[in-house]
Image: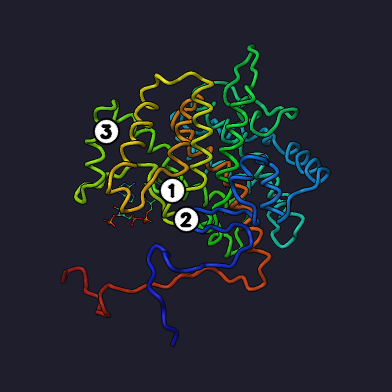
């Protein structure tokens, strides 16, 4: 008989082999196809990183041009999707809308659900990368009761997203290039992160042969939780709850108290045990954006800066190797840009879509693909006989 390993939380189980992303948690290193994340964040941009993740190599100038054009061609949503959005309550969380809309894409694109055809897989990947900004922006517009803004194909990926979120009819909307660059960086820094919970969810869903849109919807659902992608929203809500700088010690004490479930949101990481290389880049970006927007007097941002300082100086956090992660700083940038907290996780989801779909593609290409089927340690009752209802 087979011997099973008991590993709740998969802290020491490799579920697959992969050539996409490498993380060395002790060194604080993150590589995509071998390229360090700080170099990609500095010198590359999101769509080029998408190409790299999907196809394994950096594109030539021509390849990049064709790829960008292809993605641009797919940015529109089927017009009937408008009705789907309108079916939600206005106060629906945009993540709930995204799970629904992305899942529903399987009902709109029957052609790309033939996962045995590599060309159809590619089209599904392009559709997802192209349409996610439109879906996320529309979820936002719907929640605030403003008209949907259609994608504009002469704009780059990040500027187009910002415009779909923030422009209103009859008013000119100029995208600030510094904000667009910061947005692109947020996308780039979230593009992939090997076998995290949502990516593993996508792989597990896809291991049964499910269609790509359903698999990505499963990933979005998993990402939503506060221990994962929901941390950026939870972090800003925490800053709001703390309210003023003088209350920080109280919250730090709560985070250290074993009898209190409260944790400092945006701190700590399962894999990075010295620093999160994405957070280093994001912190720089946060400083740039805050300076540009002149929002130094925003109380949440003041609390964030002071909390970072006090937590990093506290021996508890040092001993447990807890430091601000990517979500701590991305939340600060998004807040400064004017996004409501409910949009933070949708922005993470749209950025991570390329990672999910690249992993999905890699898994389908694996000749040894097996359906994912963990075992369990059964701790329940042993066999017993049924008791008639009158005898219970
Ligand atoms: N505040 C206070 N204490 C913490 C925190 C925190 N944020 N994170 C971990 N700890 C403590 C925890 O209580 C435990 O203490 P002890 O060893 O005494 O029991 C120790 O540190 C190890 O924690 P763990 O929960 O066993 O570690 P993990 O690897 O299972 O959890 C984590 C990693 C990210 C879920 C966790 O650090 C956490 O909940 N952080 C806050 C949520 C967050 O920011 N998540 C975003 C992660 S990065 C982006 C993403 O992946 O989506």
30 or 351: nearer the viewer: 30
Per the model, the C-alpha gap separating discs 1 and 2 is: 8 Å
- Asked if the residue at label 2 sits under 8 Å from ligand 1, the reply is yes
Per the image, the residue denoted by label 3 is 248
Q: Residue furthest bottom?
A: 1
Foreground mark, 3 or 2, reads: 3
300 or 210: nearer the viewer: 300
219 or 116: nearer the viewer: 219
Q: Secondary structure at mark 2?
A: helix
Per the model, the C-alpha gap separating discs 3 and 2 is: 30 Å
Residue 340 sits above or below residue 353 on the image:
above
Per the image, the residue denoted by label 1 is 228
Whether residues under marks 1 and 2 lie with C-beta atoms below 8 angstroms apart, the answer is yes
Q: Mark 3: give few (<14), some (14-19) or many (20+) Cα within 10 Å.
A: some
Give me the residue at 68% from left, 29% from top: 151
Q: Image check: 284 left or right of 63? A: left
Q: Quadrant of residue 70?
A: top right
Residue 290 percent across, percent down from the top left: 49, 25
Label 1 vs 3, first from the N-terminus: 1
Residue 54 sits above or below residue 249 on the image:
below
Per the image, the residue denoted by label 2 is 197
């Amino acid at each position: 008989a087979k011997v099973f390993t008991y590993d709740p939380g998969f802290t020491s189980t490799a579920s697959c082999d992969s050539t996409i992303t490498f993380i060395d948690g002790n060194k604080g290193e993150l590589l995509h196809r071998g390229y360090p994340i700080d170099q990609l964040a500095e010198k590359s941009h999101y769509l080029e990183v998408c190409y790299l993740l999907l196809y394994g190599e950096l594109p030539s100038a021509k390849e990049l041009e064709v790829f960008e054009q292809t993605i641009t061609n797919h940015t529109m949503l089927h017009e009937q999707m408008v009705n789907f959005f309108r079916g939600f309550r206005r106060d629906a969380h945009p993540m709930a809308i995204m799970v629904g809309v992305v899942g529903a894409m399987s009902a709109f694109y029957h052609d790309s659900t033939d996962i045995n055809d590599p060309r159809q897989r590619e089209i599904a990947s392009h559709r997802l990368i192209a349409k996610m900004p439109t879906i996320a922006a529309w979820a936002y517009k719907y929640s605030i009761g403003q008209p949907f803004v259609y994608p504009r194909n002469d704009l780059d990926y990040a500027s187009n997203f910002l415009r779909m979120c923030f422009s209103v009819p009859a008013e000119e909307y100029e995208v600030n290039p510094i904000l667009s660059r910061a947005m692109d960086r947020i996308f780039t820094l979230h593009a992939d992160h090997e076998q995290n919970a949502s990516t593993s969810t996508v792989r597990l869903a896809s291991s049964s042969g499910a269609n790509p849109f359903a698999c990505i919807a499963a990933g979005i659902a998993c990402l939503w939780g506060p221990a994962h992608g929901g941390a950026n929203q939870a972090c800003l809500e925490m800053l709001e709850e703390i309210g003023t700088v003088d209350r920080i010690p109280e919250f730090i004490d709560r985070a250290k108290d074993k009898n209190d479930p409260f944790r400092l949101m945006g701190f700590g990481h399962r894999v990075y045990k010295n620093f999160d290389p994405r957070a280093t880049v994001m912190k720089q970006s946060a400083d740039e954006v805050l300076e540009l927007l002149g929002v130094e007097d925003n109380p949440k941002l003041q609390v964030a800066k002071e909390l970072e300082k006090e937590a990093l100086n506290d021996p508890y956090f040092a001993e447990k190797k807890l430091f601000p992660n990517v979500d701590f700083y991305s939340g600060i940038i998004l807040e400064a840009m004017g996004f409501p907290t409910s949009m933070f996780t949708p922005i993470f989801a749209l950025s991570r879509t390329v990672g999910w779909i690249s992993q999905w593609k890699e898994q389908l290409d694996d000749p040894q693909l097996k359906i994912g089927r963990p075992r369990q340690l059964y701790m329940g009752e042993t066999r017993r006989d049924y008791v008639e209802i009158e005898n219970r």
